[in-house]
Structures are given as C-alpha cells and as structure tokens.
Image: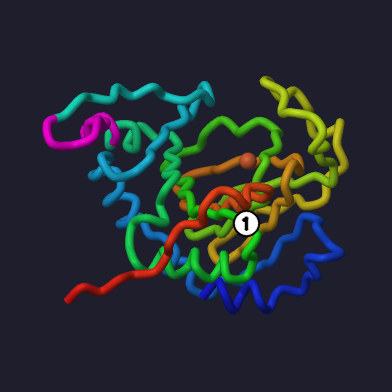
C-alpha cells in the first residue's frame, strides 16, 4: 500500500523537493479508488464534497443545494449523475471519508509525513474536456492514475511563498521550464511540489486520485484515522 511505496521512493525529501514521476509504481491502483466508489459518492451527495467542472468552459457548475428534513443541505442525486453522464469533470474532495480502508491509506501518508495535513481527492470524468490552466497550488501533491490516461506537465518554476496566488493564471508552456511531460497510465504516480506550476489534460474516461498535503498548519488538528470497533 501507500506506506511501503512512500518508504521506498528514490528521493531524499530533506534535500530534494523537485517534481517527480514514477512509472507503474502503484501495483494495485484499484485499491485506492474505483468507478463503483465514484458511483457510491454520486449517489450520496449528502456525505461528500462534490464539485463538477464544465468540460467545455472549464468553470465550476453551480448545482443547486436543497434544504432537507433530517439531513444537512445537499445536491440532488439526479443533477449530480446527469453531470457525470454529460461528461463533466467530477472532483470529490473528501473521498478519504468513504471507508476504513481509505482512512488507513491516509494514515500511511500521515505517518510518513507527520508535518502535513492530508486528504484524498478524486478526479474523474468520461469524455475529453478542455484542459485545466497552468496553475499552482499551496499543497504538495501526489497523483495516482487509476484508470485511463491523463497528460501532465509539471514545471520547474514555482511561485514564491511570499506572494499570494493570482486570480487568473495566464502563463503558457513557453513561459516556463518544463520538468515533466508525461501521459500518465494506470499505476503511475506523480509528485507536484507546493506552488509548482502544473497542467493536466484529461482525455476520455479516466479516474485519478490526488493526495494533497497541506503544510504550515500545525495548529490544525490532524484527522483521527483510527477505526473504533464497538461490537
Ligand atoms: Fe492543481
């Protein structure tokens, strides 16, 4: 599982925080996520933080959230599943909460890197879509390709932590120094350092897991990943 993979990486994190790509290093990618898991999440929008990105305009789709009796407000399953069948990109931001096994995977990540606060997100879709803009994120990130293919570019350039993020990224490939240019296939893993510019171009049906690791928030309590049996 992820703990042994992270322990085996040919990378010294104390001297090397460059982008990295490992081909076929994850032998069991379907243990991280499956389309059945995605189906479970789409059918239970009351439990998951779901977002859809329009495959043509590349903007968030504001699905209505309805007030409910005996439940927190949530989207309508029918709306969510229609977005999936229309081929829009789905992001599931709290996928690690799906079950005990995924919590154990995250426990392995957080035991390896006790400084960070991590999560497991899903990125999936069924059709070609407009590429995401070249951008950077505050979190360091591992990406695991579970199914299908996604073209990734990761650049050596980083935004400095002494500046905030711009509202509209406008950098192009020619403005930057490309470190990694790969089409990720099932079992491949990518490391994107914090604030490092990157770009994903998903194509066709694909499913990937993202493990963002936020640093610099030691005051935020780490999630309790243990499972407490009561019977
Ligand atoms: Fe990103």
**Residue bounds of the magenta highlight:** 69-80
On whether residue 77 falls in the magenta region, the answer is yes
Indicate which quadrant contains ligand 1.
top right
Q: Residue furthest left?
A: 69
On whether residue 85 falls in the magenta region, the answer is no
- In the displayed structure, 206 sits above or below 76; it is below
Q: Residue at x 42, y 32 (%)?
A: 52
Question: In x, y percent, where is residue 18?
Answer: 81, 56
Residue at the spot of label 1: 116
Between 147 and 177, the one nearer to me in the picture:
177
In which image quadrant can residue 184 be found? bottom right
Between 50 and 83, the one nearer to me in the picture:
50
Q: Residues within 10 Å of mark 1 (few under 14, many from 20)?
A: many
In which image quadrant can residue 103 be found? bottom left
Is residue 198 shown left or right of residue 217? right
In this figure, what is the number of numbered marks? 1
Q: Residue at x 45, y 64 (%)?
A: 32
Question: In x, y percent, where is residue 80?
Answer: 29, 34
Between 222 and 192, the one nearer to me in the picture:
222
Is residue 32 shown left or right of residue 98? right
Would you say the magenta stretch is mainly helix, strand or loop? loop
Q: Residue at x 23, y 44 (%)?
A: 43
- In the displayed structure, 130 sits above or below 105; it is above
Question: In x, y percent, where is residue 143?
Answer: 59, 55
Question: In x, y percent, where is residue 69?
Answer: 12, 31
Q: Residue at x 78, y 70 (%)?
A: 11
SS assignment at label 1: loop
């Amino acid at each position: 599982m992820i703990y042994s993979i992270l322990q085996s990486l040919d990378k010294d994190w104390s001297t090397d925080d460059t982008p990295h790509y490992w081909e076929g290093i994850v032998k069991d990618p379907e243990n991280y996520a499956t389309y059945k898991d995605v189906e479970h999440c789409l059918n239970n929008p009351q439990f998951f933080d779901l977002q859809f990105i329009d495959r043509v305009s590349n903007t968030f789709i504001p699905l209505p959230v309805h007030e409910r009796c005996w439940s927190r407000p949530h989207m309508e399953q029918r709306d969510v599943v229609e977005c999936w069948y229309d081929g829009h990109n789905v992001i599931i931001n709290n996928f690690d909460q799906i079950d005990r096994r995924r919590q154990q995977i995250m426990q392995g990540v957080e035991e390896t890197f006790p400084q960070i606060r991590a999560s497991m997100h899903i990125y999936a879709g069924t059709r070609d879509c407009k590429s995401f803009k070249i951008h950077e994120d505050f979190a360091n990130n591992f990406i695991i390709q579970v199914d299908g293919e996604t073209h990734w570019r990761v650049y050596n350039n980083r935004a400095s932590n002494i500046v905030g993020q711009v509202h509209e990224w406008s950098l192009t490939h020619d403005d930057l120094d490309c470190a990694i240019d790969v089409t990720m296939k099932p079992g491949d893993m990518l490391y994107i350092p914090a604030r490092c510019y990157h770009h994903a171009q998903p194509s066709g049906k694909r499913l990937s897991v993202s493990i963002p690791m936020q640093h610099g928030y030691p005051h935020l309590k780490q999630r309790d990943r243990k499972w407490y049996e009561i019977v």
